[in-house]
Image (cartoon, helix red, strand yellow):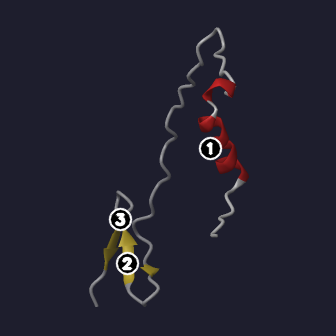
């Protein structure tokens, strides 16, 4: 006979689904959750004049949007 070891959380899930009358009830709080508005932080200034060297030896700079612009040889 083949047996499989299930994690404890999966075993408890199977047991709760097998006996729905013994499930625990979830209670909601009386007040709704509050939402926190987070203002975006200002982006760091990108140095467009620095020349970087890639892992394979290629030379590139970063454009104003932060993308790599490879330099020709």
Please tell me which residue lies in front, 22 or 51: 22
| Quarter of the image where one finds residue 53 | bottom left
> Alpha carbon of mark 2 to alpha carbon of mark 3: how far?
10 Å
Q: Which residue in the protein does label 1 denote?
A: 14
Q: Which residue in the protein does label 3 denote?
A: 67
> Alpha carbon of mark 2 to alpha carbon of mark 1: how far?
55 Å
Please tell me which residue lies in front, 2 or 44: 2
Q: What residue lies at 38% left-to-right and 73% top-to-bottom?
A: 61
In the orientation shown, which residue stands out farthest toward the front?
1
| Quarter of the image where one finds residue 35 | top right
Task: Tell me, yes or no, whether the two marked residues, 2 and 1, touch with CB atoms within 8 Å.
Answer: no
Q: Position of residue 27 (x, y in %)?
A: 66, 17
Task: Look at the picture and state if 70 lies above or below 58.
Answer: above
Position of 30 with respect to 48 (left or right) is right
Say whether disc 3 or disc 1 marks the residue closer to the N-terminus: 1
Q: Which residue in the protein does label 2 denote?
A: 60
Q: What residue lies at 66% left-to-right and 66% top-to-bottom?
A: 3
Q: What residue lies at 65% left-to-right and 36% top-to-bottom?
A: 16
Say whether disc 2 or disc 1 marks the residue closer to the N-terminus: 1
Q: Position of residue 69 (x, y in %)?
A: 31, 72
| Screen quadrant of the N terminus | bottom right
Secondary structure beneath dot 3 equals: loop
């Amino acid at each position: 006979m083949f047996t499989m070891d299930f994690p404890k959380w999966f075993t408890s899930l199977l047991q709760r689904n097998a006996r729905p009358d013994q499930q625990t009830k979830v209670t909601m709080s009386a007040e709704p959750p509050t939402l926190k508005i987070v203002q975006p932080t200002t982006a760091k200034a990108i140095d467009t004049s620095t020349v970087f060297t890639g892992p394979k030896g290629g030379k590139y700079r970063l454009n104003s949007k932060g993308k790599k612009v490879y330099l020709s040889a």
